[in-house]
Every structure is written in structure tokens, then in C-alpha cells.
Amino acid sequence: MTENRQIVLKSRPVGLPTPENFALETAPMPVAGEGEMLVRTLWMSVDPYIRGRISDRKSYAPPFQIGEPLDGYFVGRVEESKGGRFPAGTHVFGTGGGWRDYHAADGKALRAVDPDIAPLQANIGVLGMPGQTAYVGLLDIGRPKEGETVFVSAASGAVGAVVCQIAKLKGCRVVGSAGSDEKCAWLSDEAGVDAAINYRTCGDLEAALAAACPDGIDVYFENVGGEHLQAALSQMNFFGRIVACGMIAGYNDSAPRPGPNNLFLVVGRRIRMQGFIVSDHRERTDDFLSDVGGWIRDGRLRWRETVVEGLERAPDAFIGLFHGDNFGKMCVKVAE
Ligand SMILES: NC(=O)c1ccc[n+]([C@@H]2O[C@H](COP(=O)([O-])OP(=O)(O)OC[C@H]3O[C@@H](n4cnc5c(N)ncnc54)[C@H](OP(=O)(O)O)[C@@H]3O)[C@@H](O)[C@H]2O)c1
């Protein structure tokens, strides 16, 4: 092979991204130098945070430039090693090889993955960045106590589904919201939540939440924002915690949306609302892998995934996140 396929940013989206914002291009095949490896991307992740990086807004991660290849989390296989960190044949996880077929790297920023614990693509989901987000967000920021009520939005997604199940493992009452009856049924039947709300069909979300949380909400794991935040605030208990993980409902807004009109509740009810970014919590990676790996081995943690086949379809998979096309982790299969 002499050419390397990659997806580049063609233009910056205004509102919802479209396929025209991306292009499939080819570049010369990378060559592993001394101390490097040639890595074949097998699976790549599309994640909501990429929406921020294809804008030129100032954020915690620098924007991608127009004409440049995108990047993100991937699972790959070392095809050739010239003294890189891992020998040929090793499966690896990290960034630097997303949205492209091959890349060369020394491997210092990658970690080897064990295909025997879970299928390879689980390393971009439940055993990867989304799983760690759920783990540190719920346990370190939300700090739920046994018997408390935890409400999770985008509950059947990559992060949300793990939050729901860890909260159940910690003895909490768990309520999740999701955008279809099928997702809600999975949350109740497979993930074990106590109540699931289809926010698209429930009518008044605040009333539905009040009915599902008769003892109020102690921890709100916020993935969505907008109407969800307003509804959750109305049901928060005194000294409740809001884990501000993401607010996907607003990622495609061209102008700032109004805040919740009941935000003052945080004062009277002494609510703590804290944002976090998972990459600030790398010191928890070993704990995360040990706990979540153990729960997977014991059959106590389940997950769903939606697989989109082919690197060329990565933009469609990414755009689908904003329509709820994914049921669980959205994964792009690039190669066998
Ligand atoms: N802070 C961090 O370090 C960090 C790290 C990773 C992810 N995050 C955030 O965590 C959240 C979940 O990410 P994820 O990777 O697990 O994605 P995901 O939940 O697997 O996929 C996104 C889901 O969001 C829901 N959604 C999309 N637009 C919506 C809208 N307008 N209103 C309500 N729901 C909407 C859809 O599910 P439905 O069918 O249920 O609508 C969609 O499937 C995102 O906000 C993301 O930015 C934060």
C-alpha cells in the first residue's frame, strides 16, 4: 500500500455538521523511523467533543485546522516495530491514529490492550475514554452515597450507560432519560435502572422526572443541558451535586442559549455543580481499568454499541451522535 486514507476537515460547520464539512483524502503512507512503529487503525471513535474541535471557538482542546486530518481515540494493531514501545502484533489504544488508516508513532502515549477481556472496540467505549468519564465523573465528582437517587441524561449512551450501572453497583436508585422507547427498555431490562424516561414522548419532562424521583435527586449526571438541566434543577435535593459532564443539546447552537430560569435554586438548596474533563484525571486510569475490567469479567456491567463500517463513513457516524442514531457507543470499524 502506498497511500493512506484520512478524513480531513473541509469547512467549519454552522449549526449541525453536514457530510460536506469533511472529505476523504489520501496522503503518502507513513514510514516508521528508528524507535517507532507503524500502526494500523482497526476501530476509531467518534465523540461529541469533536464538535468543539471543528469550531474555532476557544476551548480546552485546540481546534482542528481546515485541510488537516481529524484525530481521536482509536484501537489499532502494530504492523511493524523498529524499536517502538510495542512489538508487531500488539493491539494498542490511544489517540494519534483516529480518522485515518495508518500512522507512525513511538507508542509512548499508547497503551496495550488485552483482546481477551472484551472485544477490541470496547477500548474506545466502556474500557476507554467514555468509561473513564463515567467512572471519575460519578465517583469523584458526584460522590453518590448508598440509597441516594441519581439521575442520568443521555443515559443509554457511551458515558451514560456506564454511569447508570456504576450508580446501581453503589446501591443508588437510578433514573435515566433517553430518546427512544427501545433505549428506555434496555435501560430498565439490561442496565437495571429503576425508571427510564423517554424525553421525546414524555410531554412535560419536569413532571415526568418528579414522578420518577419521589425522593428528589441527589446527583444529576448532566450530559445534555437545556431543558434537561432545568427539569433536573427543579427536583434537586438540598446539598445535591450536579456533575457537569457535557451539554450536547447546545453543541450545534450558533448563538448562546438562555440559561435555566431556575438556576437560583442552587443557592437555597446548597447545590454543588462541578464541571470536569476526563483528561485531568489520568491518575485514576489504573483504578478505572481494574474496577470496570472486574465488573465486566463478573458480568455486572453491560454495554451496547452501534457499529458503522468503513473509514469513509466516519463523518456520518459523528453527525449521527446529534440525532441519537447511536444506541450505546458509536464505533467506526476501519479494518479487520
Ligand atoms: N467532560 C468530559 O470529559 C467528557 C468526556 C466524554 C463525554 N462527555 C460528554 O458526555 C456526553 C455523552 O457523551 P457520549 O460520548 O456518551 O455520547 P453518547 O451519549 O453515546 O451519544 C450522544 C447521545 O446524546 C443524545 N443527544 C444528542 N442530542 C441530544 C439533544 N439535543 N437532546 C437530548 N439528547 C441528545 C443522543 O441520545 P438520545 O437518543 O438519548 O437522545 C445521542 O445518542 C456528551 O455531552 C459529551 O460531550 C464529556
Image (cartoon, rainbow, N blue to C red):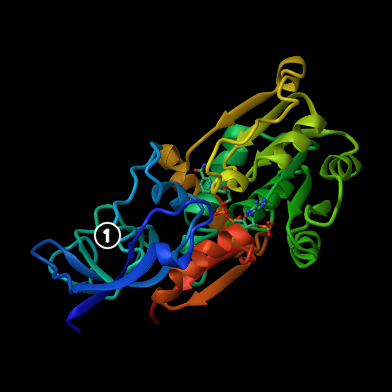
Q: List the single residue furthest toward the left.
A: 34
Q: Measuring 61% from the left and 66% from the top, which residue is drawn there?
A: 326
What residue is rendered at 65% in x and 24% in y?
A: 272
- Label 1: how many residues lie within 10 Å, few (<14), some (14-19) or many (20+)? some
In which image quadrant can residue 213 be found? top right
Q: Amino acid at mark 1?
A: Gly
Image quadrant in which you'd find residue 33: bottom left
Vertical placement of residue 58 versus 334, above or below: above
Q: Residue at x 31, y 57 (%)?
A: 110
Residue 50 point in image, percent of width and height: 44, 52
How many discs appear? 1
Front residue (pair 60, 221) = 60
- Establish whether ligand 1 lies closer than 8 Å to the Cβ of label 1: no
Where is residue 263? Give x, y as percent: 71, 24
Image x and y of residue 217, in percent: 79, 34
| Residue placed furthest toward the top | 268
Residue at 59%, 52% in the rendered image:
159
Would you say residue 103 is visible in this rendering?
Answer: yes
- Residue, far bottom: 1
> In the rendered image, which residue does mark 1 sit on?
67
Query: Looking at the image, which is closer to me, 20 or 88?
Result: 20
Give coordinates of residue 266: x percent, y percent: 71, 21
Q: Secondary structure at mark 1?
A: loop
Tell which of 204 and 141 is nearer to you: 204
Quarter holding residue 295: bottom right
Q: Nearer the viewer, residue 114 or 81?
A: 81
Q: Is residue 68 left or right of residue 47?
A: left
Q: Quadrant of the C terminus?
A: bottom left
Query: In which quadrant will I find the N terminus?
Result: bottom left
Would residue 330 appear left or right of 170 to someone viewing this image?
left
Looking at the image, is 320 positioned above or below residue 250?
below
